[in-house]
């Protein structure tokens, strides 16, 4: 879409233009799209480029797009909510945040890492499956992570597996990354099992993925983790993760718990 067809705020009744550091167009509130089908346009070098909300490669390649889209326009609160919930649980237990050695799974461009640094975590390692996430984190938040790896946590290359083991993680964070085509239960299990027993597990998940209508596999998986004493829930909170393009709230559940044992393979088979 050439930029010279620039529009007023509403463009042909189809998109709404949001102005900020970047110009972003989102579908006007009439579509009924699930989160992973949402899309928009961003003006880059005079050209409107289309992107899907779950096409992180494209989003991370435009500096500031992730923040402006999800946080400024759609009011995403999750990194903040998870970090605060974790901080509250640490305080209740009299545990110092600087003792935490955190693996941030699905770290993206580092917004969660930034919040974890704000609460004072000691060691922080990012892990993501796409290289553009790491590049964006190093570009936008170069001092947040002690290390940031790009790998599939289920089968990392030996040198990354060695480095992950070296950190002896006592905390896992995983924010806005479970379900849809993102992190499946098997990858969550692999990361969970890198954390020591009695470690902290802090994550969020869409409320529907914990309900009886769930098809992601997470509802049964997490019910089983709790029932079999693998994960003890310390705190959970349903909250507005962000709004969708229609302005409606998308609710997630934030969970902080204690790991008591590795997740057996059959839990994800
Ligand atoms: C919505 S972003 C969230 C980023 C960050 N946690 C935040 O809250 O700002 C989801 C991230 O999960 C990553 N991801 C998706 N599947 C993954 C997998 N199997 N293993 C690791 N990361 C994955 C994506 O590449 C993306 O960076």
Image: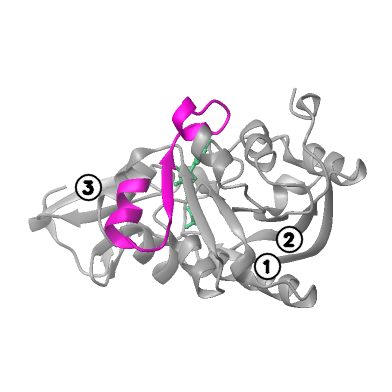
- The answer to whether 260 is drawn above or below residue 124 in the figure is above
Residue 120 lies in magenta, yes or no?
no
Q: Residue at x 79, y 47 (%)?
A: 211
Say if mark 1 contacts mark 2, CB within 8 Å: yes
Percent x, y of residue 107: 48, 51
Residue 51 visible at all: no
Would you say the beta carbon of the disc 2 residue lies within 8 angstroms of ligand 1? no
In front of the other: 243 or 258:
258
Q: Which residue is mark 1?
A: 86
Which colour assignment does the render follow? one colour
Percent x, y of residue 71: 44, 67
Tell me if 60 is positioned left or right of 219 in this view.
left
The C terminus sits in image quarter: top right
Which labelled disc corresponds to residue 49? 3
Q: Residue at x 32, y 60 (%)?
A: 142
Q: Secondary structure at mark 1?
A: helix
Q: Residue at x 63, y 73 (%)?
A: 84
Tell me if 251 is positioned left or right of 136 in this view.
right
Q: Secondary structure at mark 3?
A: strand
Q: Residue at x 44, y 44 (%)?
A: 54
Q: What is the crowding at mark 2: few (fewer than 14 residues within 10 Å), some, or many (at least 20)?
A: many
**Of the residues under marks 1 and 2, which one precedes in the sequence?**
1
Q: Range of the magenta residues?
A: 134-161
Which labelled disc corresponds to residue 256? 2
**Of the residues under marks 3 and 2, which one precedes in the sequence?**
3
Percent x, y of residue 64: 29, 62
Would you say the beta carbon of the disc 3 residue lies within 8 angstroms of ligand 1? no
């Amino acid at each position: 879409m050439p930029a010279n067809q620039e529009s007023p705020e509403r463009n042909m009744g189809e998109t709404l233009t949001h102005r900020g550091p970047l110009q972003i167009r989102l579908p006007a509130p009439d579509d009924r799209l699930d989160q992973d089908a949402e899309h928009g346009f961003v003006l880059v070098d005079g050209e409107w480029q289309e992107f899907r909300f779950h096409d992180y490669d494209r989003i991370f390649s435009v500096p500031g797009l992730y923040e402006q889209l999800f946080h400024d326009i759609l009011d995403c609160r999750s990194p903040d909510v998870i970090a605060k919930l974790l901080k509250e649980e640490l305080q209740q237990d009299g545990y110092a945040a600087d003792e935490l050695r955190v693996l941030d799974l699905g770290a993206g461009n580092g917004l969660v890492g930034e919040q974890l640094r704000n609460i004072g975590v000691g060691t922080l390692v990012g892990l993501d499956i796409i290289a553009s996430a790491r590049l964006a984190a190093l570009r936008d938040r170069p001092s947040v992570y002690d290390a940031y790896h790009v790998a599939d946590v289920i089968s990392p290359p030996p040198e990354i597996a060695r480095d992950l083991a070296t950190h002896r993680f006592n905390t896992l964070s995983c924010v806005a990354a479970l379900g849809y085509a993102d992190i499946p239960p098997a990858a969550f299990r692999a990361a969970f099992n890198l954390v020591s027993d009695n470690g902290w597990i802090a994550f969020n998940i869409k409320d529907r993925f914990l309900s009886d209508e769930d098809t992601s596999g997470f509802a049964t998986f997490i019910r089983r983790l709790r029932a079999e004493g693998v994960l003890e829930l310390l705190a959970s909170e349903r909250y507005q993760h962000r709004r969708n393009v229609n302005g409606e709230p998308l609710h997630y559940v934030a969970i902080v718990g204690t790991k008591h044992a590795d997740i057996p393979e059959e839990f994800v088979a």
